[in-house]
Image: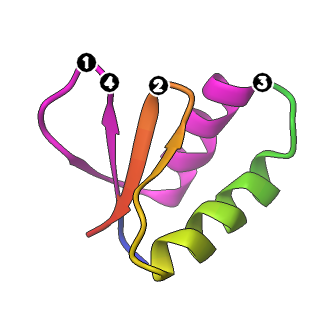
Amino acid sequence: MKIETQYNYEKKWTLTPEEDLLKIIKEEIGDADVQGTLEYIKTSLKKGKVISVGGCRFRLH
């Protein structure tokens, strides 16, 4: 699954590897369940949604 990210201040979507996705989520939500949040994002993206976590948005490539 290829996921793109975009921060609120950016205009361009960026293809992001899973390792970096985990870092971004950790920055946005702190010490909460980072892996569980990523799984939720993946599940929601499969339904065609764009998901926002903090100041970052995620979508399928």
Name the element at disc 4. loop
Q: Label 3: how many residues lie within 10 Å, few (<14), some (14-19) or many (20+)?
A: few
Residue 23 to residue 33: above or below:
above
Lateral position of residue 30 relative to residue 7, left or right: right
Give the CA separation, mark 1 to mark 4.
4 Å
Circle 3 sits on which residue?
30
Q: Which is closer to the viewer, label 2 or label 3?
A: 2
Q: Which residues are magenta?
A: 4-29
Q: Where is residue 30 drawn, in percent x and y? A: 77, 24
Give the CA separation, mark 4 to mark 2.
6 Å
Is label 4 in contact with label 2 (beta carbons under 8 Å)? yes
Q: Which mark is residue 9?
A: 1
Q: Where is residue 6 drawn, in percent x and y? A: 30, 38
Is label 2 in contact with label 3 (beta carbons under 8 Å)? no
Is label 1 in contact with label 4 (beta carbons under 8 Å)? yes
Q: Residue at (39%, 76%) from the top-left corner? A: 48
Q: Which mark is residue 48?
A: none
Q: Quadrant of the C terminus?
A: bottom left
